[in-house]
Amino acid sequence: MRRSGFTLIELLVVIAIIAILAAILFPVFARAREKARQSSCLSNMKQLGLAAMQYLQDYDEKWHRHYYPTTTQWPQPDGSPATSDIIWTHMIYPYVSNTQVFSCPSSPEQMRFNSATTYNYAFNYHGGGLMNNRKIANILHPSETLVYVDGGSYIAAPFIAPGANPDLRTDPGGHYYIDAVKAWHNDGCNVAYADGHAKWVQYMTVIKTQSMWDPTL
């Protein structure tokens, strides 16, 4: 009885076809997976925006500060080592009661409550307090003003100045350039605005739209 089987050429053709299909499909699967993470992160942003709205109602319609130091060691909700700094995450935590809300699923770093350098979201502190402790009525366009964005720590200065945080820079054209903002979601980032809503925005739009960062514009 004669045996039938694949020839070497046929086997190589099949392997080549599988490799081509894999090369086509794997990026698609990766983008689909990232899209799911983007949706989860956007849900976090929406919850942060709503928590901020509740905070405003309880504190004379003023935004929280980015942080303030104390002499007391505070235990952290996520089990991080205690810290004497009360950071913005602590101030709105009572309105969400869930540490996962502060953690972006696409961030390469684990969020820790006791360290401003390992945040997954950045607060628009913006040079001396444009959002810091500002009354909501003094924000000209709350639906267009950024409050939280994918990134780390907080955005602290519009220009490089002595003693200023270099997270926010300008390019030769005078546009804002923000190192702290991270394009973790398909070349973009999730943003929570001063009116409480949140959406995905293209990275270049975020870092070059001055009015998003300055509530006086």
Image (cartoon, grey):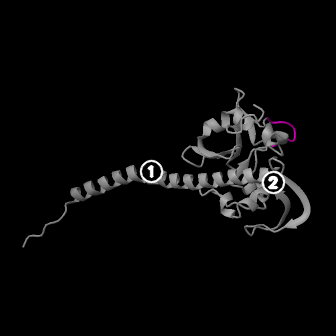
Drawn side of residue 154 relative to residue 185, left or right:
right
The location of residue 54, given as percent across then percent down, is 74, 53
User: How packed is label 1: few (under 14 Cα within 10 Å), some, or many (20 or more)?
Assistant: few
Determine whether the residue tagged by mark 1 lies in a helix, strand or loop. helix
* Quadrant housing residue 137: top right
Q: Nearer the viewer, residue 53 or 25?
A: 53
The segment highlighted magenta reads 159-165
Residue 29, magenta (yes or no): no
What amino acid type is highlighted by mark number 1?
A: Pro
Task: Report, in whole angstroms, how far the alpha carbon at label 2 lies from the one at label 1.
Answer: 46 Å
Residue 159 falls in image quadrant = top right
Quadrant location of residue 172? top right
Q: Which residue is mark 1?
A: 27
Q: Main secondary structure of the magenta part?
A: loop
Where, quadrant-wise, is the N terminus in this rendering? bottom left
Residue 157 visible, this angle:
no
The residue singled out by tag 2 in the image is 58
Looking at the image, tell me whether mark 2 or mark 1 is earlier in sequence order. Answer: 1
Taking the spot 55% from the left edge, 55% from the top edge, the residue there is 37
Q: Pointers 2 and 1 in contact (CB under 8 A)?
A: no
Say above or below: 30 vs 204: below
The crowding category of the residue bearing disc 2, from other C-alpha atoms within 10 Å (few below 14, some 14 to 19, many at least 20), is: few
